[in-house]
Image (cartoon, helix red, strand yellow):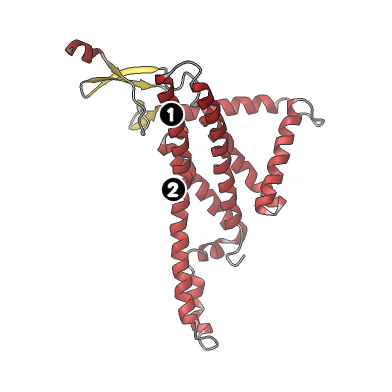
Amino acid sequence: MTGESSNEIKHETTIFAEPIFHIGNFTITNALLNSWLSVIILVVFLMAVSKKINKVPKGIQNFFEMILEIGLKFADSITGDRKKSEKFLPICLTFFLFILVNNYLGLFPFVGSIGFIKSAYGERVFVPMFRGATADINTTLALAVMAIISSHVIGVKSIGGWKHVNKFLNIKSILQISKRIKKDWTVILSAPINVFVGILEIIGEFSRIASLSFRLFGNIFAGEVLIVSITMLAAWAVPVPFMFLEIFVGLVQALVFSTLTMVFMAMNSQVHDH
């Protein structure tokens, strides 16, 4: 019994990404490798497509131009301004493609099945070389932070740094108390309320980061665990419907993340009163 247990190899789906190797003090995880693979796939594919661009579109160029036009119309429904749509769409489309490729890579056979065995706490554990990057909370959290920071950068560029900062700190309301108090004494009450609302806005920004990251992570991670569990119970035919479900979920989650990012950009590009 002792010999059998020592030869047993554990293969567990963990919440955290497993380290593969180190470059100095920098840890390379299997989720990070998967992210790099996604970037390579996108770069190679887009470079190949860009070489075939003609003034008169045909073939696959027609398809991508149609997708781009649909994307612009969808962006217009959020921003209400074609100029804003043209500014925001490249960023949001980048998020969409990166998340979509990562979501779908997690469904490929080599992701999670190719790896090595390491000893940990007296046990032999299988560590996959690749892991779906969006099934790692570190990746989704980084994407969410980038999305929110991008929305604030756009806000500063669109309405100016002073107006954008006043959305959250409401310094303007405090400074105007001495000027407006003679005409309207209620400013003593409204100004602190505006400051409190600004604090709530700051808390709301952190909640946006949490909602963006945990929504994406939770759906993709849960889907991978479900497929692994179903595959272990019945490896033939039964997992197929769940695979198609995950293809749909992967598309929806990429669309939700990029759409919400555009909504936040559109909100920050407007003056607070609007």
Secondary structure at badge 2 equals helix
Q: Is residue 272 above or below residue 212?
A: below
Tell which residue pokes out farthest to the right in this image: 56
How many other residues sit within 10 Å of disc 2, few (<14), some (14-19) or many (≥20)?
A: some
Quickly name the residue at label 1.
226
User: Could you say where residue 110 lies in the image, as x and y percent from the top left?
Assistant: 47, 18
Q: Is residue 213 left or right of residue 7?
A: right
- Which amino acid type is marked by label 2? Ala
How far apart marks 1 and 2 lie (CA) works out to 23 Å
Secondary structure of the residue carrying tag 1 is helix
Q: Which residue is mark 2?
A: 210
Front residue (pair 72, 10): 10
- On the question of residue 39 being in view, the answer is no
In which quadrant will I find the N terminus?
A: top left
188 on left or right of 22: right
Which residue is at 54% across, 43% downward? Answer: 257
Q: Mark on residue 33?
A: none
Residue lying furthest left: 2
**For residue 265, side relative to residue 238 (left or right):** right
Amino acid type, mark 1: Leu
Quarter of the image for the C terminus: give it: bottom right
Would residue 194 be found to the left or right of residue 46 on screen?
left
Picture layout, residue 22 above or below residue 258: above
238 or 41: nearer the viewer: 238
Percent position of residue 181, x then y: 50, 85
The nearer-to-camera label among 1 and 2 is 1
Where residue 218 sits, quadrant-wise, is top left
Residue at the image position 56 percent from the left and 65 percent from the top: 163
